[in-house]
Amino acid sequence: MAATKIIDAPRNGHEMAPLNTRARGDGTHGVTIVLTAPQRNSVQSVDIPGEPDRAAWSGKMQFFLSIIGYSVGLGNIWRFPYLCQQNGGGAFLIPFMIMLILEGIPLFLIELGMGQRMRLGALGVWNTIHPWLGGIGISSCIVTLFVALYYNVIITWVFFYLFNSFRYPLPWSTCPTNGSGIILEECAKSSETTYFWYRTTLDAAPSMDEPGGFKWWIVLCLLLSWTIVFFIVMKGIQSSGKVVYFTSLFPYIVLTIFFIRGITLRGAGAGLMHMYTPKVEKLLEPTVWLDAATQVFYSFGLAFGSLIAFGSYNTPKNNCVRDVLLVSVCNAVTAIYASVVIFAILGFKATVNVDRCVAVNTDILVKNAILPSKNVTSVEYDSAMHSINGSEFTALQLSECSLSKELDNAAEGTGLAFIVFTQAIVELPGAPFWAVLFFTMLLSLGLGSQIGILEGMLCTLFDIDIIKRVKKQHVTGVVCLFCFIVGFIFCTGAGEYWLKMFDSFAGTIGLVVVALMEMIAVIFIYGHERFTEDIYQMTGYRPGLYWQWTWRYIGPVIMVCILVSSVVFMVIRNPTYGAWNADLGVVEQKSYPNWVMGIALAMIMAGVLPMPIVFLMRSFQCLKVDLDIHQGSIRRNETTASTKEMIDNDDDNLSPDMPPQDSLATRFTIGDFEDDDENDENDFSGPALGGHVKTQSDFSEDDEEDKPMTMRMMMMRPTTAKTAKTSATTPLKNQGGNHLNVPTSRKQNYNKKDAYDV
């Protein structure tokens, strides 16, 4: 009987100890072993769940609404319209759609498909593909933590505004006065809504160097927001799955109400024209493409690990391709729909401001006898304004009333929701009703995304054995408490400045790097052929040229270009933040202090360095400092009552007459042991134990058994003498749903003999 040659694989720090084989008495050495990983950490068949007791969605609708609630968040309200306005208006839709098609949708399917295929969190997925890639899951978890920290602060501000929305009149509708009835100078120089935001809500500090102490009302609202989030996610999808019916559907109801009201307002058309008028020259700036890629990552929640977690709760036969396409279309349409609603109402607000400006100028012109009366036509007003030269314009203290200028200043990051839109709400009849409706919508959007963010992070943590032994409520409570304490930095007078810094650095470069590594790991290490076969087995659909080209070539190249250009641009252009100047009543751009830039750099490194650190640590076998996050095991084959007692005994009890046993697990033999003078050829560690994950390219093209074989085929194939012989004479491949192959890298002191089943 010919001996089987075991394929070499490099050491990776997870090699097994030499096997203690026993002589049969016939001069041969051998033992049949079954190599498995714990069920929670193994690549399972599409027919057999990865974890028998793993949580699962109660229905398709719950899963779909959870994905929608997670991906459609606050970014669709205040980030996407802001990016459109700052990056070329309608022209921004070009890079956005390109990134959506070439990056978002392909990576979306990778994350959702791998989670559903392996039924593991982010950490378990990448460790299963190869332990050297475990840093991807750690990096994803760290970036997710940074985003969760400041994302919940936005929910905190929403709570504060929601509570104040029940007051009549709205507290941001008028400027406060001093004891003598005179309007405060800071409010008079800015506006009512701006003053309420920077002074009443934030009590903003002049710079990041002068934080100004804690604001107790923000601390209380932050405590409330983390408490609510804790109770929602403390039991995983068993508790959060019920909340998504509200957090996902309610925003669409509110958006539709605002849409119907907004398109009937004066100036709505002007706002929409300004929003979608393309400025094509903006497309030459690399930051526009980075913003588009980042917005896609934020919109879909890519590279956070949450989609992997959501996919792992699906049934193995769920059609994840259809889910990806539906969610992608829904997300893109929602972003555009929300932008229409926002700028329709902002157009109304800008029109009202221009009318007020014209009225003030008209009064000045009438007082100076330039106009005969206030009741003049727009043509007469324009003619009078053009007749005034520059010096007279300044002397008369006239203002430039430009609708375009008003709309250019409409979107100001987070200020879009808390300054600009609140001013538009004040102009609407029944303003408190619209305010409550608007901030309840923001609250549901924020909670839906925050639930998904934390679910992805917690699912990653529960891939670690030590944490898995602790109750989920306790782990969730510790995480929320930690985030609340760290969140104190956002409760100072410089809280908004810190949030902008986190938003600019914590979730941009790190996300692109993690997403790039995820695509490389699945397509080039796990293998695009294998992943394509996985998708086919789960859905019955085989990904075609579009998927193959975007996975293998277009996607990685685009992300590398964006990453390099954005880093270069960030170095050349000094990053700034907007600080509130109380004396002038305006926002001034200031450079970040050096110590703050040091923190920003540390956050970027914290999100990127775990990948090379884990790679080096495991490749050089630094086991003493390696966290036990992915174990494997070797167990004997126990399948029949007649042989169970013998197998349970010591190896000395093994009989050469014991018949081969049938098993659904992956089965292989040990053979072709090398002589003492041959090195490192007999270690049998699969990917769960640190071994190499082989693809078809690892095997000989002449092998007649080289065709991929699914777990279903292995299960249906009977165990016969012929198949037993084949298992001993052919190279080991994907025999079973675990995709665990047997590399060799450790030296064994055995004589070269034939391999037999025992």
Image (cartoon, grey):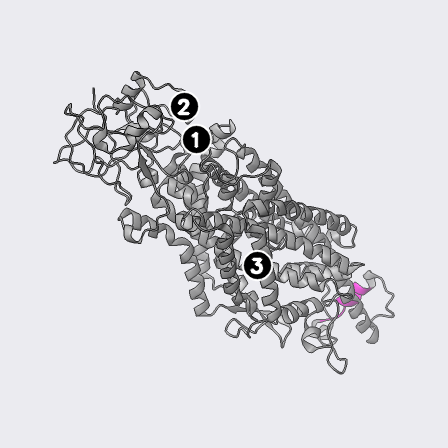
In the rendered image, which residue does mark 2 sit on?
715
> Can you tell which quarter of the image residue 525 is in?
top left
Task: For the C terminus, give its image quadrant.
Answer: top left
**Residue 84 appears in the rendering:** no
Q: Residue farthest to the bottom?
A: 180
User: What residue is shown with label 3?
Assistant: 226
Judging depth in this view, the residue of 90 and 473 nearest the camera is 473
Mark 1 to mark 2 CA distance (whole Å): 10 Å
**Residues at discs 1 and 2 in contact (Cβ within 8 Å):** yes
Label 3 or label 2, whichever comes before in sequence order: 3
Between 93 and 465, the one lying in front of the other is 465
* Left or right of residue 41: residue 12: left
Query: What secondary structure is found at the residue carrying circle 2?
Result: helix
Q: CA distance from mark 1 to mark 3?
A: 38 Å
Secondary structure of residue under mark 3: helix
Q: Residue 745, image x and y in percent?
A: 23, 38
* Residue 236 spot, x, y in % from top left: 54, 47
Q: Which residues are magenta?
A: 381-389
Residue 38 visible (yes or no): yes
The circle on residue 45 is 1
Compared to residue 473, the image places residue 178 above or below, namely below
- Residue 230 lies in what quarter of the image? bottom right
Which amino acid is tagged 3? Trp
